[in-house]
Amino acid sequence: MEKIATDIYTFAELRNKGFTYVDKTDALYAMASGDVGKQFFIARPRRFGKSLAVSTLKSLFQGERELFSGLNIEPKWDWSKKWPVLHLDMGSMQARNVDEFNELLVSQLHRRAAELGIDNPSGSLPSTLLTNLIDALAAKSADGQMVLLIDEYDKPLLGHLMKSDVTEFRDALKAFYSVVKTLESKQRFTFLTGVSKFSKVSIFSDLNNLKDWTMHAKAATLFGYTHDEVLKYFPGRIHELAEANGLTDSEAFAKIIEWYDGYRFEENALPVINPVSLGLCFDNDKFSNYWAETAMPTFLIDILKSRPLDFSCVDIEEPELSNYEPTDPKGVTLLYQTGYLTIDSFRQRGASRRYTLKLPNLEVENSFLRDVVGAYTGRDVSYTSSYAFTAGDALYEHDVPKFLKALKSFFTDIPYDMTDRQNEQMWQTVCYVVLRSIGVNVNGEVKTHDGRMDMVVDLPNDIYIIEFKLDKPASEAMAQIKGKEYAGKYVLSGKRLTLIGISFSSEKRTIVEELVESC
């Protein structure tokens, strides 16, 4: 039975203890060889193996050949060469203020210096200390170069998005990372990882020397497992999971794909499976929501509260997909970069590229929608679920009055400060996430030949076409449904069609009028 580690992020420990390592060294070699550059950056969501990749590169440049026995990179690499490696873990540098951050960073730099045999490098500022440490390490190397690996470069800043001190943290990181470019000639190889990429006018104005491989085809499957990799490396685990759940091996693999697959980091790339969630699934022999064990970051919750988004249909331009400014974080960009959304498709018109995003799989959808219900309503999911299940059951029972009554009660109970930024999209999105959070098949912004329907609920026996209006009569919503012939898309479905026009009041903050017609 294959040994799986879900809490080991050190390559040497993983290999020495006989845990399964899915061989990603071909992709690492493409970067580390120096054939296409020597300074790289890749952003990926949490729990995708970024720290393990950094640790693997550290062992590679330190020449620890025995750890790479049997891996694809072993015969390709020149093991006669070794370099001093400075490995910084910025994930442990979270602080309450910038002064505390600088103290933590200086402390880590001194520890790394001691580990690498550099006695008391001078400098009271992190940037000065890093400069002197790089100089000293490069001087120890035969070719006058060293290797710099920085994991989770953005973690100190992420906890301060939407806070007043975000600019101070941005400037502190910008000053520190400026050294990476200044001393480029003394670096044989440089690799930074993180969750986010900030805009070129921010931190990356001093990191524009890095090759951004976040959406590069050669790195698209470097993090996460492809279908073929799971079948190759974990056949015993798949069989055990199948037996534990009364499934065949192929059925178990299909459920793995449903639950944990679907992440796409380049528009033409193969989808990949979340490695940590898959490992926990194998360990527990159970399909469950392991993503939820780590809650949605607070900064995302704050953004969703202040800027309601329609998560059912997300289009975004390429520049907005890849980076943002810390002082003006974009919800869709962050949801993509943190793994809550992934690439579904893209369209190119001349030089312009536009991406359509989606929730990648069942696990993330479940986690995401539950968190968003809380963000949009100010209520814990256990509080809102009773309304949601009542509304969902009513739709399955074709009891439209009961459905509308549940929605009215639900919206009336939302705290005032959660609905003070009102527009039709906000109310539509709340309905969407509430119904999706309990598994109802609901689609938002459904395209037709003459526009977009606000919402369509597609059930085994029924289709409900719903249009929302804010401070306008429900008759206007119904007129739009009929005038644009929204029902025409479903007349051959064989299902019962119901048209619902709903009017919200910004003053009363709930449904004040509705019209229902059969079609």
Image: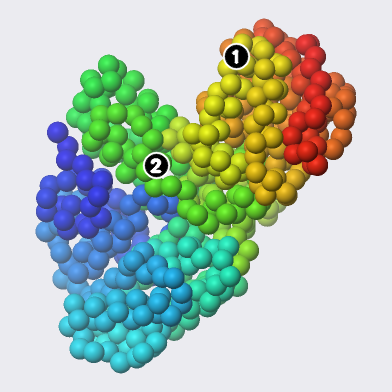
Amino acid at circle 2:
Trp
Visible residue check, residue 518:
yes
Decide: few, some or many residues near mark 1? Use Cα within 10 Å; few <14, some 14-19, many ≥20: some
> Quadrant location of the N terminus?
top left
Residue under numbered circle 2: 291
Which residue is found at the position 69% from the left and 46% from the top?
416
Residue 369, percent from left and from top: 53, 37
Residue under numbered circle 1: 396
Q: Which mark is residue 30?
A: none
Indicate whether 430 appears above or below 406.
Answer: below
Residue situated furthest top in the rendering? 494
Residue 277, percent from left and from top: 34, 40
Dot 2: what SS?
helix
Residue 460, percent from left and from top: 58, 12
**Front position in the image: 66 or 331:** 331
Amino acid at circle 1:
Tyr
- State which quadrant residue 5 falls in: top left
- State which quadrant residue 9 falls in: bottom left
**Front position in the image: 448 or 370:** 370
**Front position in the image: 478 or 483:** 478
